[in-house]
Image (cartoon, helix red, strand yellow):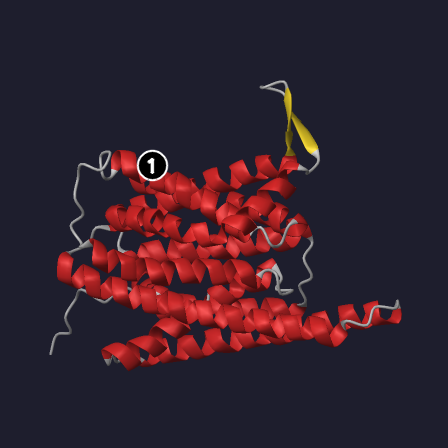
């Protein structure tokens, strides 16, 4: 029952978070630092109270190791946020980040000298092809959009395409930084044991120091949010700028999502957790496309199918399904 509740939290929290994220990004694409700071702050406050028990409980993993982990995590989050400023559609952003298996495998081979089964290499190839198809189609849509703008008198086609390419480079960099963080976590857990809740707190609390470097940008975005169109909240009988309502929704749903994933990691095998998170990504993507009417062609769907089929193949879901549907015979052949 706990696993079922956690699964519901993941789907409800994460999919709802996509709605609020899209609402925020559609009006203020450069506000990533603001809502990331708000999410980090909420998780840090909750962790300070319940994980560290108001700072009285010392971490099992040394703080110096968490600082290295935080460097990877903070850099990845910030670069992913800034990529949205470079004409990267949110569906493409989600699909591109689904290619983390490619980066993980590449760094695993290089840094840990790992070897993988043949079906995992095939899955990585499928994911790469899927991302390439979606990226190529998005490039074409960017070119067509700005070509029509040029006919209307706008002469920024080359500049906007260049910005889009820079955004892709940023996503690629963040993808490998995230993979490097995962490998570093693997090494830490092997040495000190698994402490995911502790890692969740310190990975969100320590980066709050880094947000001081982004203080001006966060402050400016907060001012813009405050000038947004007011929305009436019946329960409070008051009007609040709608962007702050979206922000509250984003922060709360992100917390619910992360909390659900944490519960799943303690209740289910990693394969089941990966499957649930992957399905959540797929449903979030489909909902984002249908609800917000994001441009998505048949080729985009083909690329998406490659990506998610590759992920399922990588996690061994198809093998598990085959073993479940066609169990090995329990009877021995009589000779």
For residue 327, side relative to residue 311 (left or right): left
Q: Which residue is painted at 84% across and 71% down in the image?
A: 150
Q: Position of residue 311 (x, y in %)?
A: 42, 67
Comparing 141 with 268, the one in front is: 141
Q: Find the residue positioned furthest to the left.
A: 335
Front-most of 102 and 87? Answer: 87
Residue 112, compared with residue 241, is above or below; it is below
**Number of numbered labels in the structure image:** 1
Q: Is residue 3 above or below residue 207?
A: above
Badge 1 is on which residue?
Answer: 46
Position of the C terminus, as image quadrant, is bottom left
Give percent across and percent down for residue 254: 45, 44
| Viewer-proximal residue among 192 and 205 | 205
- The quarter of the rendered structure image containing the N terminus is top left
Left or right: residue 74 compared with residue 94: left
Dividing the picture into quadrants, the one containing residue 76 is bottom left
Q: Residue at x 26, y 46 (%)?
A: 197
Q: Quadrant of residue 121?
A: bottom left
Q: Residues within 10 Å of mark 1 (few under 14, many from 20)?
A: some
Secondary structure at numbered mark 1? helix
Name the spot of residue 38 as percent of width and height, x first: 47, 42
Residue name at image x 50 percent, y 61 percent: 80
Can the viewer see residue 77?
A: yes
Task: Name above or below for residue 27 compared with residue 173.
Answer: above
Residue 289 drawn at (x, y percent): 63, 55
Residue 99 in sight here: no
Q: Nearer the viewer, residue 71 or 298?
A: 71
Relative placement, left or right, of 255 versus 167 is left
């Amino acid at each position: 029952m706990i696993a079922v509740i956690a699964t519901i939290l993941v789907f409800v929290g994460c999919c709802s978070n996509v709605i609020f994220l899209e609402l925020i990004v559609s009006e203020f694409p450069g506000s990533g630092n603001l809502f990331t700071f708000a999410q980090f702050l909420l998780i840090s406050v909750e962790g300070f109270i319940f994980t560290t028990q108001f700072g009285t409980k010392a971490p099992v993993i040394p703080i110096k190791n968490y600082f290295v982990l935080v460097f990877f995590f903070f850099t990845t989050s910030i670069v992913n946020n800034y990529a949205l400023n470079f004409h990267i559609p949110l569906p493409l952003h989600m699909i591109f980040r689904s290619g983390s298996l490619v980066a993980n495998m590449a760094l695993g081979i290089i840094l840990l000298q790992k070897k993988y089964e043949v079906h995992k290499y095939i899955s990585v190839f499928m994911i790469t092809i899927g991302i390439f198809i979606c990226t190529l189609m998005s490039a074409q849509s960017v070119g067509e959009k700005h070509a029509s703008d040029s006919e209307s008198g706008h002469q920024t086609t080359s500049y906007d395409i260049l910005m889009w390419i820079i955004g892709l480079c940023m996503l690629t960099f963040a993808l490998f930084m995230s993979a490097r963080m995962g490998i570093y976590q693997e090494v830490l857990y092997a040495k000190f044991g698994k402490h995911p809740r502790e890692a969740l707190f310190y990975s969100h609390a320590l980066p709050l120091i880094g947000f001081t470097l982004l203080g001006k940008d966060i402050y400016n975005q907060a001012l813009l949010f405050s000038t947004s169109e007011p929305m009436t909240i019946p329960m409070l009988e008051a009007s609040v700028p709608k962007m702050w309502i979206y922000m509250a929704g984003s922060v709360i749903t992100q917390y619910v999502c992360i909390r659900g994933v944490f519960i799943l990691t303690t209740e289910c095998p990693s394969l089941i957790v990966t499957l649930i998170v992957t399905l959540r990504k797929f449903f979030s993507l489909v909902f984002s496309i249908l609800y917000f009417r994001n441009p998505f062609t048949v080729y985009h769907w083909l690329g998406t199918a490659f990506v998610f089929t590759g992920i399922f193949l990588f996690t061994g879901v198809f093998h598990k399904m085959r073993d479940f549907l066609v169990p090995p015979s329990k009877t021995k052949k009589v000779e």
